[in-house]
Image: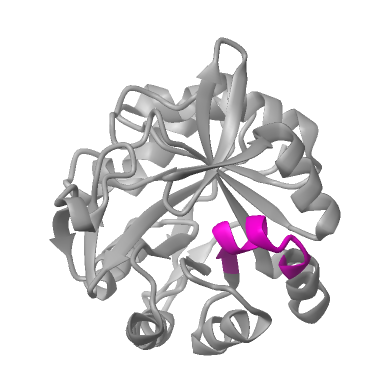
């Protein structure tokens, strides 16, 4: 079995990491400032994070320059792979972030508006670089719908069908965000995570709802996710990445563990 990944997520607004609940927005005062993205990335890298995801949650042409600067600083100082998303609307936007140091680029609303963006990115940079982030909301007892623009707009798409289409177009990974669970710390949406994981042949990253160590184990086992993404529990010191990995390992879930190289720098045992 492949090792499962533990991924901290940094939602960046005006060069500050922020957190909200159920996609709370900056304009409504629904965000809480957490800290500097570069400093936090360095800390999570030291804790043994497998990857780091950055989302520019109020992306604009002006702020994109700020995110480029953030990516350059983090890439120069951190060992782990980096994914960046938010406001990427073209292959050129993707190229800019990859050139700044990102290993993957994540698209969401722009891909829903123009699905050919997924294929164009995959053809230019490879499927392994293209992540499709899906914001899912439960709309019935047995139904989940895709939302865009930070969870504000219903798209008329069904979650599993859109995940399949995105992969067919070239997406190499799916990040599945539960709008209902986001920031609640009540646990991941196990059912929709399992359905998407079983429907696609690429890794699925579960996002939204982490509150306890047990939640992460559940979504990896019952939800069949390939990785867990979390924010608040890491940012506010409730959990540390290495503690999560130790707990998962105690449950028989394979994880990547870091060791120190002779020079003192971290190394992935199974990289």
User: Is residue 75 in view?
Assistant: yes
The magenta-colored residue range is 105-117
Name the spot of residue 237 as percent of width and height, x first. 17, 45
Q: Is residue 86 left or right of residue 254?
A: left
User: Is 121 in front, or is 40?
Assistant: 121
Q: How many marks?
A: 0
Residue drawn at the location 24% of the way across and 50% of the way down: 19
- Residue 112 part of the magenta-drawn span: yes
Name the spot of residue 3 as percent of width and height, x first. 62, 44
Q: Which residue extends farthest top?
A: 141
Q: Quadrant of the C terminus?
A: bottom right
User: Is 222 in front, or is 63?
Assistant: 63
Q: Quadrant of the N terminus?
A: top right
Residue drawn at the location 30% of the way across and 70% of the way down: 42
Residue drawn at the location 35% of the way across and 28% of the way down: 213
Residue drawn at the location 22% of the way across and 57% of the way down: 26
Colour convention: one colour
Name the spot of residue 79 as percent of width and height, x first. 46, 73
> Where is 20 relative to 46, above or below?
above
User: Is 253 in front, or is 137?
Assistant: 137
Residue 212 lies in what quarter of the image? top left
Residue 128 lies in what quarter of the image? bottom right
User: Is residue 227 in view?
Assistant: no
- Residue 233 part of the magenta-drawn span: no
Q: Is residue 244 left or right of residue 121?
A: left
> Where is 8 relative to 185, above or below?
below
Name the spot of residue 261 as percent of width and height, x first. 45, 72
Residue 183 lies in what quarter of the image? top left
Q: Is residue 181 left or right of residue 33?
A: right
User: Is 254 in front, or is 175?
Assistant: 175
């Amino acid at each position: 079995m492949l090792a499962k990944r533990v991924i901290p997520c940094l939602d960046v607004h005006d060069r500050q990491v922020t957190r909200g609940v159920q996609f709370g927005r900056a304009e409504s005062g629904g965000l809480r400032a957490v800290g500097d993205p570069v400093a936090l990335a360095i800390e999570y890298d030291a804790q043994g994070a497998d990857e780091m995801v950055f989302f520019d949650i109020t992306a604009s042409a002006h702020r994109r320059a700020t995110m480029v600067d953030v990516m350059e600083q983090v890439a120069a100082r951190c060992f782990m792979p980096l994914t960046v998303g938010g406001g990427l609307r073209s292959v050129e936007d993707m190229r800019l972030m990859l050139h700044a140091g990102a290993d993957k680029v994540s698209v969401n609303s722009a891909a829903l508006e123009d699905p050919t963006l997924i294929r164009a990115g995959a053809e230019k940079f490879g499927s392994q670089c293209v992540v499709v982030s899906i914001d899912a909301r439960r709309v019935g007892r047995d139904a989940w719908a895709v939302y865009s623009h930070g969870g504000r707009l219903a798209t008329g798409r069904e979650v599993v069908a859109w995940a399949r289409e995105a992969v067919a177009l070239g997406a190499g990974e799916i990040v599945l965000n539960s709008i209902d669970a986001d920031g609640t710390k009540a646990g991941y949406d196990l059912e929709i995570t399992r359905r998407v994981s079983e429907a696609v042949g690429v890794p699925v990253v579960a996002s939204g709802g982490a509150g306890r160590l047990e939640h992460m184990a559940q979504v990896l086992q019952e939800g069949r996710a390939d990785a867990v993404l979390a924010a608040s529990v890491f940012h506010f010191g409730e959990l540390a990445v290495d503690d999560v990995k130790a707990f998962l390992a105690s449950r028989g879930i394979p994880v990547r563990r870091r060791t120190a190289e002779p020079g003192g720098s971290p190394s992935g045992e199974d990289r």
